[in-house]
Amino acid sequence: MRSLTTLFATLLLTLIISTPATSASKADVVMLDSQMVGDQQIFLNGIALREKFVFDVYVAGLYLLEKSSDPAEILQRDEPRMMLMHFLRDVEAKKIIDAWYEGLEANVENVTPELKAKFDQLAAMMTDIKENQSMGFIYNPVTGTDIMVADQPKGAILGKDFADAILATWIGPKPGPGKSFKQEILGLE
């Protein structure tokens, strides 16, 4: 747990560094061009702004071992990756949970009872997110997906099936945050 806490502390620093040498920014949120997962360096694939109606909700960055704009290729790979979100407004846990389940149904063809149980496990980890707090999903093929909610490490969920399903909610055929968000996170805009 100590290494998980250290990793999440590093991620939080990523979001508050004001002038890093190599970074990308959107809506005044800065994300480094690369991060470390275990002993592997992963790279910022894209940065996107999640908007709902006229409100900015969060800025997200997708980190991959090798950059790609092909969702199927990204999901096929069994290698480290990270999705990091910095919230620009308060969001209730229930809204986040509802979005996960909607994204699962809309973007995963075969939702098995085991996969649904993993999303139930994720839902149990959710708390309300306040403005300027972060959420992160760090997949390592060896250890599963480490989850951070409201700047706090919450644990890990095992299995590539879960890692793929949660990422598909952003890059699948019907991404919850919308097609423009998907294009941005895939580095196409």
Image (tube, grey):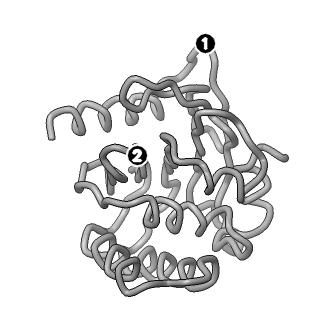
Q: Amino acid at mark 2?
A: Pro
Q: Who is closer to the viewer here, 91 or 148?
A: 148
Residue 49, image x, y percentages: 67, 54
Please name the residue shown 73% across and 59% down the image: 182
Please name the residue shown 40% across and 43% down the image: 140
Q: Is residue 178 left or right of residue 62?
A: right
Local SS, label 1: loop
Q: Amino acid at mark 1?
A: Ala
Q: Is residue 103 above or below residue 126?
A: below
- Tell me the tag on residue 128: none
Task: State which mark lies toward you, 1 or 2.
Answer: 2
Q: Who is closer to the viewer here, 168 or 95?
A: 168
- Dot 2 crowding, Cα within 10 Å, few <14, some 14–19, many 20+: some
- Tell me the tag on residue 21: 1
Please name the residue shown 67% across and 30% down the image: 24
Residue marked by disc 2:
141
Distance, label 1 to label 2, CA atoms, is 29 Å
Residue 149, image x, y percentages: 32, 56
Q: Is residue 173 left or right of residue 43?
A: right
The image quadrant of residue 90 is: bottom left
Residue 116, image x, y percentages: 39, 82
Please name the residue shown 31% across and 33% down the image: 7
Q: Who is closer to the viewer here, 156 or 175?
A: 156
Q: Is residue 137 left or right of residue 32?
A: left
